[in-house]
Amino acid sequence: MAERFKNYIGGEWLDATTGQTFENINPSNMEEVIGRFPRSTKEDVDMAVKAALDALKGWKTTPPPERGEILYRAARLLEERKDELAAVISRENGKTRGSCIGEVQSALDMANYMAGEGRRMFGRTTHSGLRKRFAMTKRYPIGVVGIILPFNFPMALSGWRVFPALICGNTVVLKSDEYSPQTTVHFVRILEEAGLPKGAVNLVHGFGGEVGEAITTHPDMALVSFTGSTATGRRVAENCVRRGARVSLELGGKNGVVVMDDADLELAADGVVCGAFSVSGQRCTATGRVIVHRDVYDRFLAILVEKTSSLKAGPAEDDGSDVTPLINKPQLQRVLGFIERARADGCRIVTGGRQLTGGVYDRGYYVEPTIIECDGPTKEIAREEVFGPVLTVLTAEDYDDAVRMLNVSPYGLSASIFTRDVTEAFKFFDDAEAGVCYINAPTFGSEPHMPFGGLKDSGQGYREVGWAAIETYSELKTLYVDYSEKIQNVQFVEED
């Protein structure tokens, strides 16, 4: 019998008000039900928001260094249970144990970083334009924050969103993704054990159309942080803007790598293969395109195909697996659909392109690592996010042509260039329309103390990681103290 999990509201573990549940399935073994989770509704969200509002009164007045001590304790618990937590993530997310240990480390790093920010919740002081007047700013919490997670990095993104929200004094309603809900249960249990006050974080499981919609439309939700597809992100934004709430969106990407004629081709191929095919391309910063200078195109493609062909596809429990299963059948159908439409659009399947079947492959949803040669950057396969192990290869005449093709995409999350030319490397920072840029590295690898986010259809300007997260999850008050013992104002004009 699969374990039955519950929501966490106001410090209590509760079933959904309807009593209904849904199953969480192991992507590496579709016959295994990991657990049953509450299929929550608006009523459960209402309860969670009320609990968060009640807890806000005490949490926002808790000094930030004291909040930080709780985050430090959470970091120590994450460190102690790293292996245990990695096993949970691997089982429900379909990623290898090694990659899941890295995910726990990412959350742990964010806990430590944000705990330290509890003693750096800085405002500014400055001179007034008037005599005997003091001017300063101070940061305050926004209120109740709704955080809607994706399936692919449930522990890392829980940490990247919840820890900044808490250190700023907000309380949280956290929605797990229905394909990775167990990880968030363990995350919340750690916060509970670390001493977080009841109601400061509330966890509600369920589906986007029910729980997610209720979070984004709730009148007491001051800010909603959403990570997921651009299409859903637009709906989240509409719901929030309609009622005057803040919204922070981390959306899709069609991340590109430029390979110049002076690049180390072996290094570039390693970076592209890692970026395109690790975790089956199911990361927002996965490499979806590689744009190669025509003078090295044939050599680079040969190296790329050789390295891709050596990748091993297999289940999460096999640490030798390079390409693990897709999360579910709809994602499999989505990826195969992109491949078939690319073929119909005149693109050439260089390698891969098929669903893997037989043996362990029949227990999950596997697609061969796929390379598709495309003759232009405007075709669907070169523009749209696949979220699977599919890489598009394009030819560029020179640096300017490569950057032009890179920027054709409506997305602008991350980008990379491989070159030995320092001039072109620094020009790339200015020219690439992406929120995160790399030189001689894959398109992923952001660190917790550095801001992260995208441009264009990949986001809308907020950054939720590093020091910039404090600006997202807090608001400034401008404060004046007048000790002149008279009424004065810069907008008054005194006449002689």
Image (cartoon, rainbow, N blue to C red):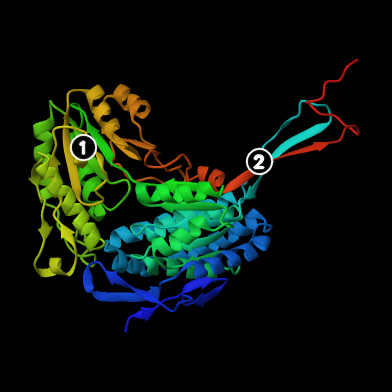
Query: Does 495 sit above or below residue 435?
Result: above
Residue at 37%, 47% (x, y): give it.
Answer: 251
Query: Does 256 sit above or below residue 176?
Result: above
Residue 290: mark in rendering: 1
Instruction: Pick the residue in front: 462 or 217.
Output: 217
Residue 494 x/y as whole percent: 86, 20
Residue at 19%, 60% (x, y): give it.
Answer: 321
Q: Is residue 489 left or right of residue 448?
A: right
Q: Amino acid at mark 2?
A: Gly
Instruction: Residue at the far top: name it.
Output: 496
Residue 273 x/y as whole percent: 20, 45
Q: Is residue 322 visible?
A: no
Query: Which is nearer the N-term, disc 2 or disc 1?
Result: 2
Callout 1 secondary element:
strand
Q: Quadrant of the C terminus?
A: top right
In which image quadrant can residue 256 be found?
A: top left
Residue 250 x/y as whole percent: 41, 47
Residue at 25%, 46% (x, y): give it.
Answer: 275
Find the distance from the CA under tag 2 to the CA under tag 1. Answer: 43 Å
Q: Is residue 333 left or right of residue 455?
A: left
Q: Which residue is mark 2?
A: 123
In which image quadrant can residue 400 be found?
A: top left
Instruction: Pick the residue in front: 7 or 197.
Output: 7
Q: Quadrant of the N terminus?
A: bottom left
Mark 1: give few (<14), some (14-19) or many (20+) Cα within 10 Å.
Answer: many
